[in-house]
Image (tube, helix red, strand yellow):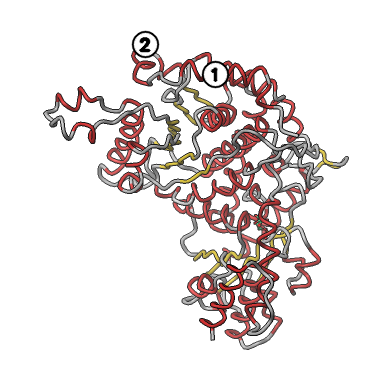
Amino acid sequence: MTANLTTQPAWKKLNSHYEAIKATHLRDLFADDPKRGETFSLDAVGLYLDYSKNRITDETLSLLIELAESAGLKDRIEAMMTGQKINTTEDRAVLHTALRAPSGANIEFEGRNVVPDVHAVLDKMAAFCEAITSGSWTGHTGQPIRNIVNVGIGGSDLGPVMAYQALRHYSNRNLTLRFVSNVDGTDFAEATRDLDPAETLFIIASKTFTTQETMTNAHTARTWLLDGLGADPSAVAKHFVALSTNAQQVAEFGINTDNMFGFWDWVGGRYSMDSAIGLSTMLAIGPEQFHQMLAGFHEMDQHYRTAPLDKNLPVLMGLLTVWYTDFFGSQTTAVLPYDQYLSRFPAYLQQLTMESNGKSVTLDGDRVDYDTSPIYWGEPGTNGQHSFYQLIHQGTHLIPCDFIAFGKSLNPIGDHHDKLSANVFAQGEALAMGKTREEVLAEGTSEELAPHRVFEGNRPSNTLLIESLTPAVLGKLVALYEHSVFTQGVIWQVNPFDQWGVELGKVLAKKIVPELESTDQPLAHDSSTNRLIQRYRSLKA
Ligand code: F6P
């Protein structure tokens, strides 16, 4: 069976509407409506979204909203936020919004209010942070902890790394934070080469506590520590803590479960940076600012749950993504933060967006006959401008861009911030308006060179303009994209909360490890894989 989305009335209307407006230029839309910049903007929960530079009209928006309504988006949001098992392929609830609910809230899952459990873990994390920063928690030799190494991968790494970079301005500079994710030994070696084991704490972050990369790095960390501290196994207790849902595996690894910070089955890995997985973030910025970040998340959750669909930031952004992906055929979306602190934000979003909506069957198991998640990518501005922006301006692909800009710099040095901000506004303008052949010729460019210097324009972008990057703002930004992804998933009828697509490679890798360790084990792969393994064996020898 194929999915029924494209046969729905709202979809069909969008199709005809697309045919009618696909050639309309943003230049004309702005010329026709001097108030367009105001009309197509939304100021909510401290974020200002200018979405006027999108190839949309009032009609586009009402048809997209009709599509969301016919998909039952409001009910799906309620189902998610009230703990229904909407992750049907794993038979799980999806309650990351409970991780940032205030302590008095009541969110029930299987008859139990989960909010007190969430806050009990947050309190335990805060007490631990206090013990580390005050120096009352010491290492095996009595020295205070100065280095924190988070060992995890995917959702147990990307969120913590991104948040640490993003909130570095607010961080305790007496602590050195490092992150080890790759099973490539280089990652561990370089992260630890200048650290003193006596002052180093490893946070082993893994929801399942079975992930090959993390477990390999965790064992290497234990060996590194014991080699450095004289092989006394009791040292592990003072230098290892675990973030996990799997107490049994944590204990088997040798970490006392008193030093484990738990979370729950209903927290997906890529939705977990505000759970115990955020321990490194809390250590860096302190419990108070961590709570400010959670409050920011919660504000966006409330907005998503209660604001009308046409005044709802994540809904608008999600629907615009559907518009470009399925009607304009856009394959990618660029996220371009004009803030160096957000340098890892696009990488973080790659897991959030693509592991969530990189699906080709619906919740009912039907094959989709439309595109789902675009490829997300990006780099901070202005660096990207001197690299790949050429293609966004004059290449053959239509790449919707999300610009993220701030009114105030956290490092207000000279006129850096005005120059930075001038660039972000200039890029949005240039992409939308372009430069016509007439304009190029009027500048004195020769006929011959003119085609090279014409900018077609009509390239869409959103601009988020925010006062400054604070912990609360980071929470809002992450929740904005989480809910935009959910909105997209609801329209596409896929399950944004499973990730079966990563399994096959994992299983095959497990099978191949012994084949690489052996020199003569017979190989039964395809001829390409067989030859690669044979060649690897000889290179290794
Ligand atoms: O690669 C798949 C995945 O399951 C991600 O979804 C997850 O974030 C990551 O692996 C790490 O999993 P864990 O936290 O269980 O080690």
The C terminus, quarter of image? bottom right
- Residue 396 is situated, as x and y percent measured from the top left of the image, at 38, 37
Q: In which quarter of the image is residue 357?
A: top right
Determine contact: label 1, label 2, CB under 8 Å. no
Q: Residues within 10 Å of mark 2 (few under 14, many from 20)?
A: few
Left or right placement of residue 457 versus residue 484 in this view: left
| Among the two numbered marks 1 and 2 on one chain, the one whose residue lies closer to the N terminus | 2
Percent position of residue 209, x then y: 72, 64
**Residue at position x 53%, y 18% from top?**
60
**Residue 533 against residue 134 in the figure, above or below:** below
Q: Residue at point 27% right, 40% down?
A: 419
- Which residue matches tag 2? 32
Q: Name the residue under label 1.
A: 61
The x, y position of residue 191, in whole percent, is 50, 70
Q: Is residue 218 above or below residue 173?
A: below
C-alpha span from label 1 to label 2:
17 Å
Residue visible at 53% across and 53% down in the picture: 285
Amino acid marked by disc 1: Leu
Q: Tell me which image quadrant ligand 1 sits in.
A: bottom right
Whether residue 56 is visible here, answered yes or no, is yes
- Front residue of this view, candidates 268 and 320: 320
Near-viewer residue (153 or 146): 153
| Secondary structure state at the residue bearing disc 1 | helix
